[in-house]
Image (spheres, rainbow, N blue to C red):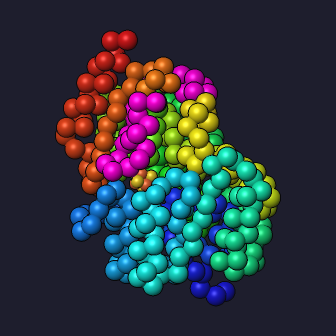
């Protein structure tokens, strides 16, 4: 078996096609929360750190796929810096209007960049894993799994840990436990840059029962390019805000949430959405902002505690 090429991803790119092309996906964001790097030239720390690590070859990948159209303009620029440093880079675009034919054409370009689809059975295997992921997500909402354990699995659906067997093992190592559900909370926006955020929230009696972006990672699938395009064109972060908000309203109601935490990242355009989220989602809402990776700062812990007390009073 030839050595698999390791392909970096900057955001959601259908991993189904990367595995089908006999490559191994690697979500470059997954190294950030544990990183101690302070990037030299930064707006958002997520893109600045992966840009620096890739350009300096501290993170060694065969090539990079940048989601350039759809959810992050910082990635568009930092992705070009990586390309200028000599890493083969492909720019992937989602359609704002959900046009599945456009997305299908993007998926064919992606396959051209990667080679050929030598393992067309892989998308079907991933679809099965995503069905298991949906059940795990449901169990967490029923108080049978810890919020942090489920988050770590859900966030890994972007690249399935680069190896389906390794990922299967990680899923089967999840241990059921009884979690007291006092305050059911939805976490919307991009994921927190703090590696212990979910565990901290749970220790403060805020049980996260919905992770907006990671849920997108496991919600979409398909067994061939045509079906993958039809499903992924509803990726909410790439669509207009009213589309995303309608989806959120449904999910939050289904999960009987008591409150919402809106995580925003310093220098990210998603911050501008906060006032719209507040006006459209009829729940008590706490907005927090992170910058550099690491542990959840004490100041944010105090704000979470105050939010919990406010929810206890409702
Ligand atoms: S937090 Fe915002 S700016 Fe940073 S990578 Fe994510 S979408 Fe881009």
Classify 123 as above or below 119: above
Asked if residue 313 lies left or right of residue 63, the reply is left
In terms of depth relative to the viewer, which is nearer, 175 or 132? 132
Quadrant where the C terminus lies?
A: top left
Task: Residue 275: name its quadrant.
Answer: top left
Asked if residue 303 lies left or right of residue 47, the reply is left
Q: What segment carries the magenta color?
A: 248-276
In terms of depth relative to the viewer, which is nearer, 72 or 173? 72
Q: Residue furthest bottom?
A: 2
Task: Residue 198: name its quadrant.
Answer: top left
How far from the left and from the top, in percent, is residue 234?
Answer: 67, 45
How far from the left and from the top, in percent, is residue 19?
Answer: 66, 70
How far from the left and from the top, in percent, is residue 161?
Answer: 53, 64
* In magenta segment, residue 193: no
Classify 72 as above or below 21: above
Asked if residue 128 lies left or right of residue 36, the reply is right
Classify 303 as above or below 83: above
Q: Residue at x 48, y 19 (%)?
A: 282
Q: Residue at x 58, y 49 (%)?
A: 238
Q: Residue at x 46, y 78 (%)?
A: 83
* In magenta segment, residue 256: yes
């Amino acid at each position: 078996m030839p050595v698999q090429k390791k392909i970096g991803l900057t955001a959601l790119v259908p991993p189904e096609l990367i595995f089908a092309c006999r490559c191994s996906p690697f979500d470059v964001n997954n190294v950030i929360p544990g990183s101690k790097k302070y990037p030299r030239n930064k707006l958002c720390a997520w893109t600045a750190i992966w840009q620096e690590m890739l350009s300096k070859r501290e993170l060694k990948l065969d090539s990079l796929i940048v989601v350039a159209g759809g959810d992050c303009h910082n990635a568009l620029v930092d992705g070009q810096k990586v390309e200028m440093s000599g890493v083969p880079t492909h720019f992937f675009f989602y359609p704002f209007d959900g046009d599945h034919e456009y997305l299908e054409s993007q998926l064919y370009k992606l396959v051209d960049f990667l080679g050929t689809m030598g393992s067309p059975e892989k998308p079907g295997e991933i679809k099965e894993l995503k069905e298991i992921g949906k059940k795990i997500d449901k169990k967490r909402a029923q108080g049978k799994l810890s919020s942090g354990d489920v988050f770590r699995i859900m966030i890994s659906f972007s690249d399935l840990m680069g190896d389906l067997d390794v990922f299967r093992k990680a899923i089967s190592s999840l241990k059921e436990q009884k979690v007291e559900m006092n305050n059911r909370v939805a976490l919307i926006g991009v994921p927190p840059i703090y590696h212990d955020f979910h565990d901290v929230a749970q220790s403060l009696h805020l049980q996260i029962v919905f992770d907006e972006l990671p849920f997108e990672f496991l919600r979409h699938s398909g067994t061939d390019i045509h079906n993958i395009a039809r499903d992924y064109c509803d990726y909410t972060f790439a669509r207009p805000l009213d589309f995303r908000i309608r989806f959120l309203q449904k999910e939050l109601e289904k999960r009987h949430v008591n409150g919402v935490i809106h995580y925003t990242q310093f220098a990210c355009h998603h911050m501008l959405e906060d006032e719209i989220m507040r006006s459209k989602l009829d729940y008590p809402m706490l907005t927090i902002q992170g910058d550099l990776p690491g542990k959840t700062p004490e100041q944010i812990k105090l704000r979470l505690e105050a939010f919990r007390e406010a929810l206890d009073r409702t």
